[in-house]
Image: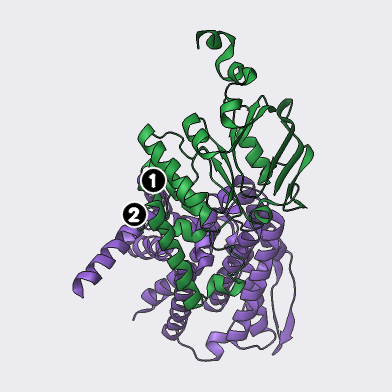
């Protein structure tokens, strides 16, 4: 479904991605891990068109999407969340999620200004149902900036899901959360986000990655250094070096 | 009503259009120092239409506003790829260009033995439709406010619609809005066009109220004021800019004691307000709170 082929990207002289190849089949849940600055988020940014690759290409559903404008890529059925949390702070929780519906193919140009009441009600009910699922229903009328970090991450997840994307890119969905909150988030992703969907997850929390992902891809300095099943990959010597360094490994 | 009050109220009404125009762009996160250009384009064009071509006021107003919208759309297309400060500078440059064009713009015809029409820096005299049609100052004021209320109602509808939501999303986070599958540039150009139209309505009313236009009126200060009205009144609702206009023209103009010092007092007021209320008196949070209160009160009343 998603094919990243020979992808290169650099900021000036700094190579952020070097010849990265990654194939994700429909229904796969792939974990993308690596130390800070290894290029994980850059992969998402190139897939979603925020950065243009300097070499290589990205194909989605057998069509090349690298080079398209971000909004064109998104409307083909990709949704993402952000590591550093991007929400519409001055809008309500409900409006944050409702806002992600505006570009759905069944919202016509005319309906952007004049809603068709019945369709609009159906769309709004979908938002309510999703808010219920992610546990934000009672906060629906709050301004998003007043939510706790945990709930803001849930809001981002809901906003990504409302468009029923075929491919979901989650960038540290449990970033900054306590162990208990992380567990809840993992359960939420497993039960609500993953069924019937293809997903790539960036995360540092290995328990979560091992629990959710069938396959892991490890990046270091923009290169893929390992790929495979979670338990195998985590024993891989290069992976341990990348995370812990030689000395750390000796202690471990 | 005495003439002085009618004049002030009419001024408030006309400048409100300009303030709403700047407000709409502020919603989408763009600061424009050039809304006075669309005000000017429409003022001149509608004046030409009524005084020289003999059109009725409504047709002239519509023509002026449409031309202003077209100009704003065009400017939007070429400048909205620029971000933040660069867009602000580009709008300022465009507005000055328009003003200087009117300084060298001569187009006159002879009506009843008198030349009528824009005469460059000498200005454009005798836009007399209001007098020739025996519309009194009070009646004209009522016309201005009727149209203002219609525009306001349309803006409230807009703010409840998906399009209004898109404008606010753009104002908060452009990249994130791109990531919701929305063509950011296209919607900003649309906002610019609508803003141009609204400014144009104000310009057309102004031309027929003043009966005399000169390019100097449409200088940067007019645009800066329009911008500031939204910023101090609040960006949470279309009422915000109206509060700003009321504060400046209504309140300060009415207190004769500060006359002559008006700009100084107003400047100080703006500075203080923006320190304590960076998004104005009626900002998003206060509007949100008011909405919750209103809902609670309505539910309790049931």
* Residue A27: percent from left, percent from top: 61, 49
* Residue B283: percent from left, percent from top: 38, 55
* Residue B143: percent from left, percent from top: 46, 83
Q: Residue at x 65, y 79 (%)?
A: B63
Chain with colour purple in the figure? B
Q: Identify the element where label 2 is drawn.
A: helix
Chain with colour green in the figure? A
**Residue B117 - label:** none
Tell me which numbered mark, 2 or 1, is placed earlier along the sequence. Answer: 2
- Quarter of the figure with the C terminus of chain B: bottom left
Dot 1 falls on which chain?
A
* Residue A156: percent from left, percent from top: 48, 48
**Where does label 1 land, which residue?**
A151
Determine the CA span between mark 2 and mark 1: 9 Å
Asked whether A224 or A154 is in front, the reply is A224
Does residue B135 lie above or below B69 as drawn?
Answer: below
């Amino acid at each position: 479904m998603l094919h990243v082929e020979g992808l290169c990207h650099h900021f000036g002289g700094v190579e952020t991605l070097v010849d990265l190849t990654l194939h994700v089949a429909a229904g796969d849940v792939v974990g993308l891990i690596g130390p800070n600055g290894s290029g994980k988020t850059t992969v998402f940014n190139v897939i979603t068109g925020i950065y243009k690759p300097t070499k290589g290409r990205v194909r989605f559903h057998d069509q090349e999407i690298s080079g398209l404008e971000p909004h064109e890529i998104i409307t083909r059925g990709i949704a993402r969340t952000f590591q550093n949390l991007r929400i519409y702070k001055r809008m309500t929780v409900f409006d944050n999620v409702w806002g992600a519906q505006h570009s759905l193919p069944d919202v016509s140009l005319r309906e952007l200004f004049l809603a068709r009441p019945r369709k609009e009600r159906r769309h709004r009910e979908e938002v309510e149902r999703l808010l219920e699922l992610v546990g934000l229903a009672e906060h629906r009328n709050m301004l998003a900036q007043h939510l706790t970090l945990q709930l803001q991450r849930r809001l981002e997840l809901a906003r990504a899901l409302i468009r029923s994307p075929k491919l979901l890119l989650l960038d540290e969905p449990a970033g900054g959360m306590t162990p208990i909150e992380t567990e809840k988030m993992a359960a939420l992703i497993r039960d609500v986000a993953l069924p019937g969907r293809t997903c790539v997850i960036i995360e540092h929390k290995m328990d979560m990655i091992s629990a959710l992902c069938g396959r892991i891809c490890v990046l270091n300095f923009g290169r893929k250094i390992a790929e495979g099943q979670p338990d195998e990959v985590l024993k891989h010597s290069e992976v341990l070096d990348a995370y812990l360094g030689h000395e750390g490994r000796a202690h471990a | 009503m005495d003439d002085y009050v009618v004049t002030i109220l009419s001024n408030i009404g006309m400048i409100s259009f300009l303030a709403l125009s700047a407000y709409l762009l502020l919603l989408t996160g763009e600061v424009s120092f050039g809304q006075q250009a669309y005000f000017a384009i429409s003022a001149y064009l509608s004046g030409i239409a009524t005084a020289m071509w003999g059109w009725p006021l409504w047709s002239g107003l519509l023509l002026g506003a449409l031309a202003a919208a077209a100009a704003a759309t065009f400017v939007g297309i070429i400048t909205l790829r620029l971000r933040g400060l660069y867009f602000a500078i580009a709008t300022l440059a465009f507005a000055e260009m328009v003003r200087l064009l009117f300084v060298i713009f001569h187009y006159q015809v002879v009506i009843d033995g008198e030349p009528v029409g824009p005469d460059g820096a000498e200005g454009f005299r005798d836009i007399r439709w209001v007098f020739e049609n025996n519309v009194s100052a009070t009646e004209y004021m009522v016309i201005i406010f009727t149209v203002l209320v219609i525009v306001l109602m349309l803006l409230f509808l807009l703010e409840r619609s998906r399009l209004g939501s898109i404008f606010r999303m753009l104002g908060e986070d452009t990249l994130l809005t791109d990531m919701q599958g929305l063509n950011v540039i296209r919607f900003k150009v649309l906002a610019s066009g609508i803003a141009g139209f609204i400014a144009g309505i104000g310009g057309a009313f102004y031309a027929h109220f003043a009966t005399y236009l000169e390019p100097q009126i449409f200088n940067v200060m007019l645009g800066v004021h329009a911008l500031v009205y939204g910023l101090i009144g609040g960006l949470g609702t279309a009422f915000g800019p109206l509060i700003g206009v009321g504060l400046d023209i209504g309140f300060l103009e009415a207190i004769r004691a500060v006359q002559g010092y008006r700009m100084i007092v107003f400047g100080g007021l703006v500075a203080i307000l923006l320190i304590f209320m960076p998004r104005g008196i009626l900002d998003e949070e206060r509007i949100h709170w008011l909405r919750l209160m209103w809902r609670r009160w309505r539910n309790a009343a049931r």
